[in-house]
Image (cartoon, rainbow, N blue to C red):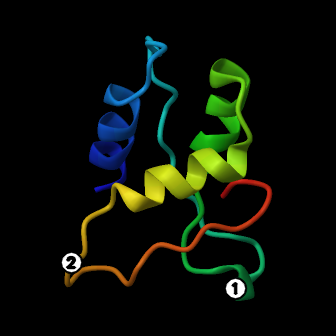
Amino acid sequence: MLRRALADFLAAQPTPVDPAPDVALETPRNPEHGDWACSVALKLAKILRRKPLEIARQIAACIPANDLVAAPEVAPPGF
């Protein structure tokens, strides 16, 4: 789902990103920070010259509602 959301986000960008950064899900060290984390928005911030938090919010908005995961949450600086 995250890879698809990233692909949808990148397809909507005026600047092509090739190759797209690798999407890696990690478990946060602190369980209070959620079940999973991904830093792809931080990697894209340098390429797109935009704030990682803004990018993370836009990618999260591309994740469709489903029964497998709760709604994605974005956390500073862009996870």
**Above-or-below relation of 45 to 63:** above
Residue 27 x/y as whole percent = 61, 68
Viewer-closest of 59 and 4: 59
Bin the neighbour count of mark 1 within 10 Å (Cα to Cα): few under 14, some 14-19, many 20 and up.
few
Viewer-closest of 25 and 13: 13
Residue 70 x/y as whole percent = 38, 84
Which tag is nearer the camera, tag 1 or tag 2? 2
- As shown in the figure, which amino acid type bears the numbered disc 1? Pro
Question: Mark on residue 5?
Answer: none
Q: Residue at x 25, y 75 (%)?
A: 65
5 horizontally vs 45: left or right:
left
Q: Which residue is mark 1?
A: 31
Residue 32 x/y as whole percent = 72, 88
Residue lying farthest to the left in this orientation: 67
Q: Residue at x 35, y 30 (%)?
A: 12
Q: Residue at x 70, y 68 (%)?
A: 75
**Above-or-below relation of 76 to 5:** below
Quote the CA–CA distance across marks 1 and 2.
23 Å
Q: Which image quarter is the N terminus in?
A: bottom left
**Above-or-below relation of 37 to 6:** below
Secondary structure under tag 1 reads helix
Bin the neighbour count of mark 2 within 10 Å (Cα to Cα): few under 14, some 14-19, many 20 and up.
few
- As shown in the figure, which amino acid type bears the numbered disc 2? Asn
Secondary structure under tag 2 reads loop
Q: Which residue is mark 2?
A: 66
